Image (tube, grey):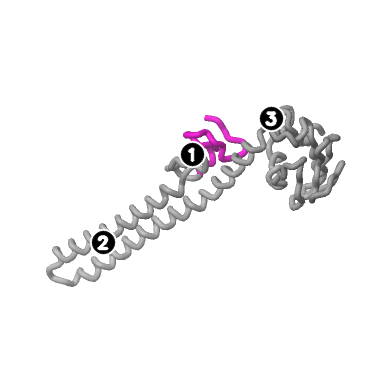
């Protein structure tokens, strides 16, 4: 089927556009064979299509094989991500695509950053509650407890506030857009549902839903 073929070359008519003089206008096409193998076909180019540093007219390859068009080395696994898009885009710059996929990969890592922040925040607040309960229980048998309890409670609250402030400052430097580095400031699930940064509009998923 035509939509299953990935076209690569210098012309904007291709799915993947590589603006390099060593790459022909219509350089090659890639056809999926199985879930783990593809066929690459050279389109009679002067600089050639190479698989594992050997020139080919057509050759079956996998994710671990090395591809080269003329003098341009390609990230094979990254190139094959084009097959995850439906419908498959046309005229996409290879350099822009690499940046976008890097942003998507780095965005996926933010889920762990958000989860760790929430877990640590809960831990700090839980420990504060346990300590406060223990202090009050321990001092309940002392006849005059007003001043000591007040001093201890204030000190404990201040310590917790410092921990929370330090945690939030660290979170603000890590939980940022991979492209514009703006603090995202909302739950990860909300970001993933929207699918893009409201500041720089960088897609975080391969099919972002516009609001």
Sequence-first tag of 2 and 1:
2
Place of residue 5 in the rendered image (x, y in percent of width and height, measured from the top left): 79, 36
Question: CA–CA distance between discs 3 and 2?
Answer: 60 Å
Q: Which residue lies at the image location 52% right of the left edge and 49% below the top edge? A: 111
Residue position marked by numbered label 3 in the rendering: 91
* Position of 84 relative to 124 (above/below): above
Quarter of the rendering occupied by the N terminus:
top right
Residue 209 highlighted magenta (yes or no): yes
Sequence-first tag of 3 and 2:
3
Crowding near the residue tagged with mark 1, few <14, some 14–19, many ≥20 C-alpha atoms within 10 Å? few
Residue position marked by numbered label 1 in the rendering: 180
Residue position marked by numbered label 2 in the rendering: 156
Q: Nearer the viewer, mark 2 or mark 1?
A: 1
Q: Which residue lies at the image location 47% right of the left edge and 42% below the top edge? A: 181
Please report the bounds of the magenta region as a residue range.
189-211
Q: Which residue lies at the image location 42% right of the left edge and 50% below the top edge? A: 171
* Position of 162 relative to 11 (above/below): below
In-front residue for pair 145/121: 121
Left or right: 121 in relation to 99: left
Place of residue 10 in the rendered image (x, y in percent of width and height, measured from the top left): 73, 32
Q: Nearer the viewer, mark 3 or mark 2?
A: 3
């Amino acid at each position: 089927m035509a939509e299953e073929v990935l076209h690569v070359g210098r012309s904007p008519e291709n799915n993947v556009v590589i603006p390099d003089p060593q790459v022909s206008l219509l350089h090659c096409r890639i056809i999926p064979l199985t879930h783990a193998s593809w066929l690459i076909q050279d389109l009679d180019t002067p600089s050639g299509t190479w698989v594992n540093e050997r020139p080919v007219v057509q050759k079956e390859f996998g994710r671990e094989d090395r591809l080269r068009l003329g003098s341009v080395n390609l990230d094979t696994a990254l190139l094959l991500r084009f097959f995850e898009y439906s419908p498959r885009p046309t005229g996409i710059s290879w350099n822009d695509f690499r940046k976008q996929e890097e942003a998507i990969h780095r965005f996926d890592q933010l889920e762990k950053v958000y989860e760790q922040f929430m877990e640590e925040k809960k831990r700090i607040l839980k420990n504060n509650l346990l300590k406060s309960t223990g202090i009050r229980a321990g001092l309940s048998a002392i006849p005059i407890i007003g001043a000591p309890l007040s001093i201890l409670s204030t000190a404990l609250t201040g310590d917790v506030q410092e921990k929370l402030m330090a945690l939030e400052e660290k979170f603000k430097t890590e939980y940022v857009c991979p492209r514009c580095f703006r603090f995202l400031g909302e739950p990860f699930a909300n970001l993933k549902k929207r699918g893009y940064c409201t500041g720089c509009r960088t897609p975080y998923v391969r099919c972002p839903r516009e609001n």
